[in-house]
Image: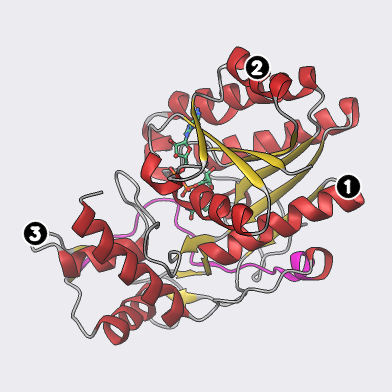
Amino acid sequence: MKEILVTGGAGYIGSHVVKMLAERGYHPIVFDSLENGFAEFVRGHELVQGNIGDYALLADIFRKRNIACVMNFASYIAVGESVQLPLKYYANNVANTFELFRAMLDSGVKRFIFSSTAAVYGYPEEVPIRENAKLSPINPYGRTKLMIEQALQDIDAASGMKFIALRYFNAAGADPGGNIGESHTPETHLIPLILRSILEDEYTITVFGTDYRTHDGTCIRDYIHVNDLADAHILALETLVSKGESAVYNLGNGRGFTVREVIDAVKRVTGKNPKVKEGPRRPGDPDVLVASSEEAMAELGWKPQMAELETIVETAWRWERQRKRKGW
Ligand SMILES: NC(=O)c1ccc[n+]([C@@H]2O[C@H](COP(=O)([O-])OP(=O)(O)OC[C@H]3O[C@@H](n4cnc5c(N)ncnc54)[C@H](O)[C@@H]3O)[C@@H](O)[C@H]2O)c1
């Protein structure tokens, strides 16, 4: 029951989950194409380089090993790019993921934990957003995630493969050890970009839109520490094993911060002034995205431990300086 296949495990969130799985006595097997991940993030753990679209390679692993559950982080993640290159996103996030499902079903592996996203909601009608809110993604990235959630329901009904889909809000922060953290190319996430505007002479962060319906005009988002996400995955795994029921949960802190408030938190934590300019709105950015995570708390027994924005920024700052030193 201890071997867990972590697809996309060499990326930002996956590598934090891999570290925590090992700390809690599981044996994570990382499976990653390394297209956007780093072998260094999972040093000391078993790593298979491969693509989730590779049915034969996955079926071979499932045949030889005793995989209790697959946790899938492997996908492309950039909303803007998904608008420009939708087929790239449908091919990887949907078609390749189906090959993973096929290999699982053919090998009798019947537990799956899925990285879903707040993007499945689109423009929410109510905030905080509950899991039963309308699902209406407004970009190809969000649609690929919703397609997988829907496919999982059909596959469960037909084959009894049980799943938990976790809809993350804004993953942020880094392991306090400072050896793993966020590293996307291109980076599109707010906190690393603010920190880079401090560390890199030539980089200035743009605040996209200052006329949103929020108290300071900038967008409000719910930032959740990556280790709190990792903890939720392990609780989800244990709940899937003990209850054997499929479910969907939001994961956020239930508190939102504007872009300006995050910039202020960075100033307080680092004692430095980020370089900031203002720009027009980007299409497809809702005013406010804040999660209700009450169901995850009640049913998984989850409680975020690093919920303070300062803590999130502090750990990201430690990592960002390390990342720059290592040239990642
Ligand atoms: N970062 C966030 O704020 C956020 C929010 C909501 C949901 N998510 C979801 O969480 C998951 C992980 O996000 P992340 O920020 O760690 O991204 P990431 O890009 O750092 O990690 C994704 C990993 O998957 C690997 N990968 C991609 N396609 C693959 C394939 N076909 N086969 C094998 N490996 C493949 C990449 O090499 C990378 O290591 C993604 O599915 C993303 O959609 C992330």
Discs 2, 1 touching: Cβ within 8 Å: no
The kind of residue on which mark 1 rests is: Glu
Residue name at image x 69 percent, y 69 percent:
292
The kind of residue on which mark 2 rests is: Asp
**Residue 145 seen anywhere in this rendered image of the structure:** yes
Q: Nearer the viewer, residue 116 or 138?
A: 116
Residue name at image x 41 percent, y 36 percent:
83
Q: Which residue is mark 1?
A: 245
**Residue 133 seen anywhere in this rendered image of the structure:** no
Q: Which residue is mark 2?
A: 60
Q: Nearer the viewer, residue 69 or 258?
A: 69
Cα distance in 3D space between marks 3 and 2: 47 Å
- For label 2, the SS is helix
Q: Which picture quadrant has residue 202?
A: bottom left
Mark toward the start of the polypeptide (2 vs 1): 2
Mark toward the start of the polypeptide (3 vs 1): 3
Cα distance in 3D space between marks 3 and 1: 50 Å
Residue name at image x 62 percent, y 21 percent:
58
Q: Give the number of the disc on residue 45.
A: none
Residue 57 percent across, percent down from the top left: 58, 17
Density class for disc 2 (Cα within 10 Å; few <14, some 14-19, many ≥20) is few
Q: Which residues are magenta?
A: 277-297
Cα distance in 3D space between marks 2 and 1: 27 Å
In the figure, is residue 85 to the left or right of 153? left
In the displayed structure, would residue 135 be above or below residue 261? above
Q: Which picture quadrant has residue 260?
A: bottom left
Residue 295 magenta-highlighted: yes
